[in-house]
Amino acid sequence: MRLYLIVSASPSLCPGDNPQATHLPRAWAPLARPPPHGSRLTADLFSTNPGALKSPVSEQTTTPEDQRSPEDPLTPPPPAASLTPEPHNPGTPPDLFESVAEGPVVVQGGSPKLSSVPLDLPAGGNGGEGKQQPTFFPTPLQEVSLEEEGDEPDIFDTMSSPKLQLNQAEGDGGDEFIQITVSDPQKIGDGMSSYMAYKVTTKTNVSYFRKKHWSVMRRFSDFLGLHRKLVEKHLHSGRVIPPAPEKSAIGTTKIKLGSDKNADSGSLDFIERRRAALERYMNRTSTHPTLRADPDFREFVELDAELPRATQTSALSSAGVLRLLNRVGETVNKMTFKMDESDQWFEERTQQIESLDAQLRKLHASMERLVNYRRELALSTAAFAKATAVLSSVEEHSSLSRALHQLSESTERTQTIHHAQADADFYVLSENTKDYIQLISAVKDVFHERVKTFQTWQHAQITLAKKREAKAKAELAGRMDKVQQAQEEVTEWEGKVERSQEEFERISRAIKKEMEQFDVMRVKDFRDMVIKYLEDLMTSQQQIIKVWETFIPEAKAIS
């Protein structure tokens, strides 16, 4: 630690400019560029010996001009022959942060400070010779060396240590996260009244949740009920609501009529696909800060009890039929009404969304073909393994029979690898792409809400024009009883027009903000999807190579 003493003076008080500077107190004398570390200049400057430095009162003469550097007129001459100040480059300004003296660090009140240096200035000056100099550090300070002593930590090293940085991040709250897993599907009940329940486990550090880790049981209709509530509350505000998994009447009926012990592979596959879809839906919903703070969402993940039955989620209920009719009406409205877009951003994003939707559907179709190909490859590999095993059993040549048997076992292992890779392709590529196709539909719904808001605004403007026209006609006809009523209606619709315009501008801003977040999450999800797919593909290929490397010596042993 080095101490820097910087004593400044007004330009009018500099000795080079003011001839009366020699009468100023010595403490205001200009301080030259710091001498090199270890020189005696510091000690002499602050020496209490009056002979070390002459007082300006006792000696009125200043340093001769020939002893000063022309580029550095304020540099005083060396006070003694033993002083060897550091040579100064005439073209370089003095560096105020060079070392003056090596000083210890003072720790006072838990924070490092510079220690005091004895500033017993030379006595005298301005007729005050022998007067006590002011104390710059009146309180006693504890001097602590920066050298390591025992196990004492260095304060400057610990400031950049990972542990301290982690503690500081925790102290600042850190990054909020929430992770939800859906697991342990269980069939509750028998027959057509049975249903599937899932264990929803939440881990989070968000402050408004009561716990950090907990689990609850939820049935499939509860997830659909949560999605319906979020749509009703936030869609009109311009929020993109992640879609919930679709219902499957065929898959649900098979599960209800089947038994747990005799469940076929198709039913188990359907249950696993639904479980994974529910988990992705919950995590996408929880990443939205507004949706995860919604009271209905918090009740869904926190309430350790059964939720009220969501009866309106059934496709055969009256609410389901009404939703179907509303969808048909909205579809007709989308086809018949074309909004004259004035915002170029929305015009470009609408075209981009349409193009993205078309390309994602093509990509999903290609991925489904890839998954089917791998599954067919796994089945064909299993058939080849069985045929090879049968051939090895009838082969009379011992070494060839043994090699065929090893080939059958190796092929069975590759069949397992192909099947695992097909599942990875399905859950990592195909299902995530399908989710984004549904998310694009949710984005389109948000854009359509903006169009509906514009329609409301336009309708209010048309109605206001009619009301003003009716008022004008009443005034021309001299029917004053109608004029007052018409004026009230005009005022009312003027307010509606203003509110509709504000709502249209608000939902436009909200959609732009939502699309920024959507783009960020879309890029991140597809990046993670591609990386995960490649990692799984590389792992499977390495496993296959290892299997055949093990079989090669057996094949070469055939004689």
Image (tube, rainbow, N blue to C red):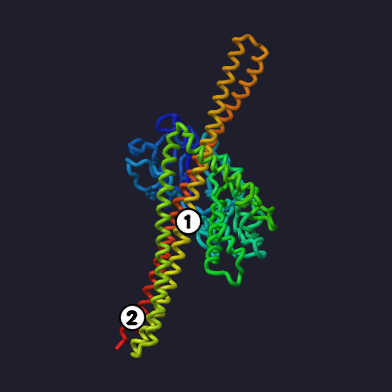
Counting residues from the start of the chain, the first of labels 1 and 2 encountered is 1
Q: Give coordinates of residue 481: x percent, y percent.
A: 68, 13
In the displayed structure image, the side of residue 184 where residue 67 appears, left or right: left
Cα separation, mark 1 vs mark 2, equals 39 Å
Label 1: how many Cα within 10 Å (few below 14, some 14–19, many 20+): some
In the rendered structure, find residue 55 and report the number of the disc placed on it.
Answer: none
Residue 411, located in which quarter of the rendered image? bottom left
| Observer able to see residue 168 | no
Q: Secondary structure at mark 1?
A: helix
Q: Amino acid at mark 1?
A: Asn
User: The C terminus appears in which quarter of the rendering?
Assistant: bottom left
Q: Image quadrant of residue 248?
A: bottom right
Residue nearer the viewer, 559 or 344: 559
Q: Amino acid at mark 2?
A: Ile
Q: In the drawing, what numbered circle is on residue 432?
A: 1
Name the one closer to the observer, 515 or 177: 515
Q: Which residue is mark 2?
A: 552
Residue occupying the point 58% across, 72% down: 262
Query: How many numbered discs?
Result: 2
Q: Residue at x 48, y 57 (%)?
A: 431
Label 2's element? helix
